[in-house]
Image (cartoon, coloured by chain):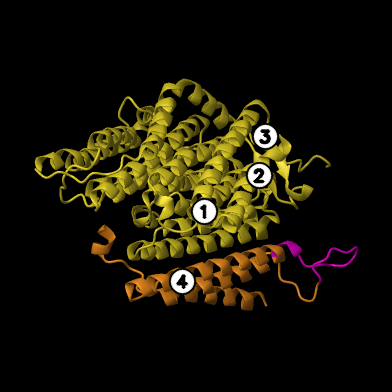
Chain colours: A yellow, B orange
Amino acid sequence: MSHWIIAPVVLPAILAGLMVMLMRHDLGLQRIFSVAGVLALNAIAGALLWAATTAPPEAYFLGNWPAPFGIILVLDRLSAMMLMLLSALALPVVLYAIGSNWDARGAHFHPLMLFLLMGIAGAFLTGDAFNLFVFFEVLLIASYGLMIHGGGQDRTRAGIQYIAFNLVGSSLFLFALATIYGITGTLNMADLAVKLPSLPESETGLLRVAAVLLILVFAIKGALVPLQFWLPGTYANAPGVVAALFAVMTKVGAYAIIRFGTLVFPTSLAATGPMLADLLLPAALVTLAVGSIGVLGASTLPRLVAFAAIASMGTAFIAIAAFTPATMSAALYYILHSTLATALLFLIADMVTRRRAHASLRASDPPIAGSGLVAALFMAGAVAMAGMPPLSGFIGKLLVLQAWRDHATIIWPAILISSFLLILGFARAGSLLFWKAHALQEEGEDRPPEPLAFTAIGAVVAGLVALTLLAGPVTGWMDATAAALYDPLPYVDATQLYEDR
Amino acid sequence: MELLVAAAIGLLTSVGIYLTLRLRTFPVILGLTFLSYAVNLFIFIAGRLSISLPPIIAKGASYADPLPQALVLTAIVISFGMTAVMVIMSLGAFLEAGHDEVDMSDDEDRT
């Protein structure tokens, strides 16, 4: 595979640069190149997924400098899976942006989106903690541009809150990295995994501080209570299609916590021990509660979906917080599902909002154009998000429940009651949007049919159906991935850190 | 000297946090800048304090750790870029809204 590992980072970067320089005024050309680029990204991610499944982890040495002096990218099962998820989600998002004309409402939608893909792909691939920070900044600066795409006073002001929150997070990230470097003298993740167990006792206090700082940063990205405040305002004010793409950004936080919680700060490490799990589990439970109560209280459709996204992150973090191979497998399956379900609901919310002229859930309006189809899609999205059969949300939550069956007294009621609240919230919103509308005698205005946008939404639904039908093989693959996470030796070997010694 | 540098970082951080919590965008930007100054200094001394030592490895001679200096360069460039983005965004918001308050009222939040 060798050089293909860096392709998911380089390809969007080159394409985005070309777009800005050569086709700034030609939206048609931008659309063609954007779709072609995302298709190519899918092909590359598929090939990398295959390589990671059949071969042990593989490292890519940037500039051919040996680790830990140079920066390395590492392809293993987890990063390949997240990469596949990212590119699979990017395709319907691009198609929807084209089909709904969102990309024509402001400049540079496609280049910014490609830069965002580059940053997220880099964050999934990198094997160096400082490089992770750099890729975080790349994805953030692209997301700032995307968040205010289309302009408007509310969107810009919500964007400022989003930027300020994330800049504080970046400072925290740097404080954590500098502390870790001061203790260990390295920021290579595999090198840290090897060096930390032999850390002298006097340094463990500092290391614990650094670990908690790092987890705080990832918790900001993953919208874990009490650091979730940026999410509802940001996602609800961002263009719907951008919010759908952001669904994978919260998963970057989850990915980073999984990576650091299994490789760098595993439960077996004496200095940190079960500290991460002890911190994460209560926070995850509160996140789930805040998300599902927020769904009940949300006053607009995008806010409702944003709180549902918080609730789904809560469920994912509950599964992660156990830090055992069995629960990690459930967490990975649930992350796949919740990304697709969140993106689906944001796309549908955007579809509804654009056709109703306002997003409020307080007043009824005449039926929107094509309300039958939109209602059916909303139903599918709500079923998936709430975790009802037959879609993959049910299987995902079942896996999480099963993984936690030894501690059923707290976890099970939390997940089950929150699912009930989600069902209530979605049923209320759906009946107001799609049923009460018919009680009014007026006719809604007509809209162009937007076949491409509906195709894009259909593709996400198809993804959820596929995840449901193939649940057996997928969970089998996840079991192997979770087992690989708890056996970091091949990962360390791939970096060739200790070959000469 | 450790005490002096540590106190400077602590002071910068506390000023940064205080300003970041203000209600208007201009102090918030200043606060974020102070935070990034503090963290840059912190990264810089993560390779230990040393005076008049070259960051070049030479046989027999002692040297300063060169890596934090590279890291801090990256961090400075990134925080500079981020501050620029933030300034432009707040200018845009100020021109559109007519004021520069960070908080959004409940009504605006609902739209």
Disc 4 and disc 3 on one polypeptide chain: no
| Upstream in sequence: badge 3 or badge 1 | 1
Q: Amino acid at mark 1?
A: Asp
Q: Secondary structure at mark 1?
A: loop
Residue A133 placed where, x, y %?
A: 59, 55
Circle 4 sits in a helix, a strand or a loop, which is it?
A: helix
Tell which tag, 4 or 2, sits nearer the viewer.
4
Judge if badges 1 and 4 mark residues of a common chain.
no
Residue A265 visible to an observer of this rendering: no
Quarter residue A184 falls in: bottom right
Residue type marked 4: Ile
Tell me the quarter of the picture where residue A77 sits.
top right
The magenta span reads: B54-68
| Distance Cα–Cα, label 3 vs label 2 | 15 Å
On screen, residue A365 versus residue A128, left or right, reads left
Look at the image and tell me in which quarter the N terminus of chain A lies.
top right
Q: Amino acid at mark 2?
A: Ala
